[in-house]
Image (cartoon, rainbow, N blue to C red):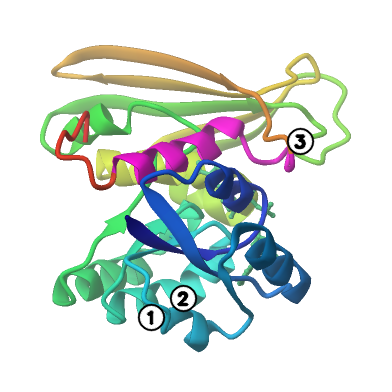
Amino acid sequence: MIHVGLLGCGNIGRIIAKGQDNFKITAVYDTAQEKADAFGKEFSAAAHTDFSAFLSEPCDVIVEAASVAAARSHAKAVLEAGKDIIIMSVGALADEEFRADLIETARKNSVKIHIPSGAVLGLDNIKVGQIARVDKILLKTTKSPASLNRPITEKTQLFGGKAHDCVREFPKNTNVAQSLSLAAGRSIDVELWADPAEDRNMHEIFFEGEFGEIYARIRNVPSPDNPATSYLAALSILSLLRNLDSPLVIGA
Ligand SMILES: NC(=O)c1ccc[n+]([C@@H]2O[C@H](COP(=O)([O-])OP(=O)(O)OC[C@H]3O[C@@H](n4cnc5c(N)ncnc54)[C@H](O)[C@@H]3O)[C@@H](O)[C@H]2O)c1
């Protein structure tokens, strides 16, 4: 049984908790005391609003499902405490200096930083970008104006440029761009579109290189408790946890 510490008792946290199987959430942490307490009571986990107390719990792995700010504040301490971390708020790793320091800390403490596939697919084979010639890697994301909080009435391109610039302009819409960039080993090209005709969060990946061409399209439904989060992202972390102790490693 894997003992999990959950950092962030929100929508993703609840989906993970409801899918406990080969793992048990034994401790939770949230800055909102009522959320931590209610979660701890419902799922029989120790509830904390003090991070040091949370970190001293005997967990094997910490799941960050809170925010970019939370990942930036706490990831290093988790690794220094000798625990693996699974980071959902991948936008936190856009900062090169922070990312390098985190990877070095993990190396020194012989622990791992896991990045789930989240709201996309194909991170496994996008990693060939680190070893093969790449001619093009573009992520085209299309969302409804409501999901982007923009009063737009016709299809409009909001951003075109590199992933690391997108994170500055649209911090809440960069987890996918950042995950793909980490996999490909370079800051990828990104287009962000608002389209009133689109009711889902759509990601299209265009990947070309010496291996041939890949085109993938993902049309995500929103999570039941948080429309800003794709349900696929929550399921992906659940699947990562369920496979964490499996001897058969698929598509890693
Ligand atoms: N990698 C991906 O593809 C992907 C996809 C969807 C969502 N996400 C990210 O996952 C994270 C969680 O998503 P969600 O839908 O569960 O969000 P949510 O808003 O439903 O829940 C977040 C919870 O974390 C808590 N929290 C926020 N900041 C905190 C902090 N500094 N310390 C402790 N607790 C804190 C909140 O009180 C809340 O209970 C978000 O950052 C989101 O952007 C990633």
* Stretch of the chain drawn in magenta: 225-243
- Tell me the chief SS of the magenta region: helix
Identify which residue, 215 or 192, lies in the foreground.
215
Mark 1 element type: helix
Using the rendered image of the protein, determine whether residue 118 is visible from the camera's viewpoint.
yes
Residue under the image location 73 percent in, 72 percent down: 32
Residue 151 vs residue 141: left or right?
A: right
Identify which residue, 27 or 165, lies in the foreground.
27
Residue under the image location 15 percent in, 70 percent down: 110
In the rendered image, residue 15, in percent from the top left (x then y), is placed at: 59, 43
Q: Is residue 189 above or below residue 52?
A: above
Within 8 Å: ligand 1 and the Cβ of disc 2? yes
Quarter in which the C terminus is drawn: top left
- Residue type at tag 3: Ser
Within 8 Å: ligand 1 and the Cβ of disc 3? no
Asked if residue 132 lies in the magenta stretch, the reply is no
- Residue type at tag 2: His
Residue 132 vs residue 160: left or right?
A: left
In whole angstroms, how far apart are the C-alphas of marks 1 and 3? 33 Å
Q: Do the residues labelled 2 and 1 touch (CB within 8 Å)?
A: yes
Q: How crowded is mark 2: few (under 14 residues within 10 Å), some or many (20 or more)?
A: some
Of labels 1 and 3, earlier in sequence is: 1
- Residue type at tag 1: Ala
In the rendered image, residue 60, in percent from the top left (x then y), is placed at: 32, 66
Q: How crowded is mark 1: few (under 14 residues within 10 Å), some or many (20 or more)?
A: some
Query: Which residue corresponds to mark 3?
Result: 147
Disc number placed over residue 77 in the picture, else none = 1
In whole angstroms, how far apart are the C-alphas of marks 2 and 3? 28 Å
Residue under the image location 64 percent in, 66 percent down: 40
Q: Do the residues labelled 1 and 3 touch (CB within 8 Å)?
A: no
Identify which residue, 200 or 193, lies in the foreground.
200
